[in-house]
Amino acid sequence: MFTYIVALLVIVDGVTRIIHEIMKVSQKKRRCTQAVTATCLDLRYIYGRHRRIMYYIHIWQYDFWGETIIVSDKIHDPSLEPNIGVSAEIMINPDDPRDIFRSVPKIADTQIGIGIVTAAMGLIMEVGFIYIHIMG
């Protein structure tokens, strides 16, 4: 009986990861509905685990309702090219202009992938336990 519960918990963990990431991204898209043109003012550099990978964090500047806003991007992606001075269209939350959305971060895709693998492993465990119980 314990093995069934463990397999069920693994399935629930995987499904929860998938739902959480999808809801987080969809809520951000739903909030950030106003398109603005922003300019990359500067870059901040941070290092990943064990200082092996350097991530670029863009510092954006844009005008909204006559106010100049400067905000850091929340996307930490080593594949993004440093592009100071380049303009890009970003989506902002009209109620909170510092809340921005540019694209789905790769970490969300990673979490969804981990959720799928986890749920599949739990499902395989559950089917295996049921098969052993029936045949055994």
Image (cartoon, rainbow, N blue to C red):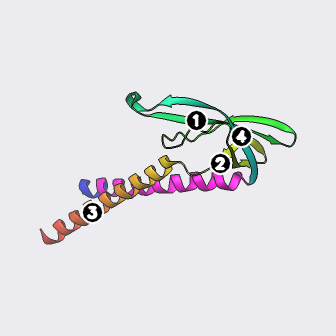
The first of marks 1 and 3 along the sequence is 1
- Amino acid carrying label 1: it is Ile
Q: Is residue 80 left or right of residue 28?
A: left
- Element at badge 1? strand
Q: Separation of disc 1 and disc 2 at Cα?
A: 14 Å
Give residue 39's quadrant in the image.
top right
**What secondary structure prevails in the magenta region?**
helix
Quick one: label 3, few (<14), some, or many (20+) residues within 10 Å?
A: some
Label 3 amino acid? Ile
User: x%, y% of residue 24?
Assistant: 58, 51
Residue pointed to by mark 4: 39
Q: Work out which quarter of the rendered image holds the N terminus and state it.
A: bottom left
Tag nearer the camera, 3 or 4: 4
**Counting other residues with Cα less than 10 Å from the Cα at mark 4, is it few (<14), some (14-19), or many (20 or more)?**
many
Q: Residue at x 54, y 41 (%)?
A: 81
Q: Dividing the picture into quarters, in which one does residue 12 lie? A: bottom left
Residue bearing mark 1: 57
Give residue 100's position: percent from left, percent from top: 68, 45
Q: Which mark is residue 25?
A: none
User: Does residue 75 appear in the picture of this structure?
Assistant: yes
